[in-house]
Amino acid sequence: MAKGRLIVPVLNIAAAGIVFLFTTILTIAGVGSAFIVIPTFYWLGVPLTEAMAIGLLLNAISMTFASANYIRYKLVLFKTAVPIIILAVIFSPLGAYSTRYFPKNALILLFALFLIFAASMMLFYKPKKKAEGQGDGGKELKTGVGLGIGAGYLGGLLGVGGGNFIVPALVWLGVDPKKASATTAFIVVFASLSGFFGHAATGNISGNLLAFSAVGSVAGALLGSWLMHKKLDANQVKKMIGIVLYVIAAKMAWGLLP
């Protein structure tokens, strides 16, 4: 009986530590930690639907605190973020709702291939920098619409928050990697929260597990955003984002193996 009573507190403490570690690293890339938190929680015995809901909510919590720092550092591009947010918020619950009907293996494989391409772009492609507010406005608008729909729907469907699509696309458009990461973090707050409500409607959520995880998430977000702004230059951030995307792709492809 004593052993049984210890299982839940140990799980909660372990979850807080895991979330803190992952959130610190991934806040630097602006993609949120849900893609690692979800399978880790599932492996620890948390039901998949609950793990997806908690992962998305933790994304929203951590990116809220990170974005507060990024806004203070003047790294968030609001004109770029707002159109993407509007469409992502609309399509993220639709993606989350689709999880009960949509066969995901083909989508996961395509997503992994896309991430490999995006990571390669981050590491090897050198876009021409442009001043903020300059460039092809029509191209940026079309990209924003595509990102909002794609990141919202697929982020909700796969429980990853959508940041994996947005960061490389913004860098490809010539946005400074630090600003791309910070702007994506701001977008992920709304996309993840919207996806969370879609998943939360399908299952129960442990309040204690969420509370412990949220503490680790907030601490990791504050540390990660500080490291990104104060300790890393734009090229280091770009390399880190590329490596993170490769890791995400490998993890997703590994999950498809029998």
Image (cartoon, helix red, strand yellow):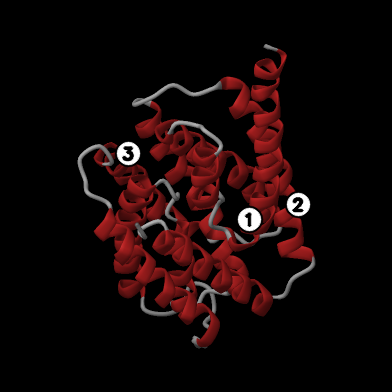
The image quadrant that residue 257 belongs to is: bottom left
Give the number of callouts: 3
On screen, residue 32 above or below 198: below
Residue at mark 2: 223
Q: Are discs 3 and 1 less than 8 Å apart at CB?
A: no
Residue at disc 3, secondary structure? helix
Residue at mark 3: 93
Of the 4 image quadrants, the one containing the N terminus is top right
The image quadrant that residue 228 belongs to is: bottom right
Q: Are discs 3 and 2 less than 8 Å apart at CB?
A: no
Q: Nearer the viewer, residue 101 or 71?
A: 101
Q: Residues within 10 Å of mark 2 (few under 14, many from 20)?
A: some
Q: Are discs 2 and 1 less than 8 Å apart at CB?
A: yes
Q: Nearer the viewer, residue 140 or 211?
A: 211
Q: Residue at (60%, 75%) from the top-left corner?
A: 238
Alpha-carbon span between mark 2 and mark 1: 9 Å
Q: Is residue 76 left or right of residue 228?
A: left
Residue at mark 1: 27
Residue 98: x percent and y percent? 24, 41
N-term mark: 3 or 1: 1
Farthest residue, direction right? 231
Q: Amino acid at mark 2?
A: Leu
Q: Is residue 121 left or right of residue 239?
A: left
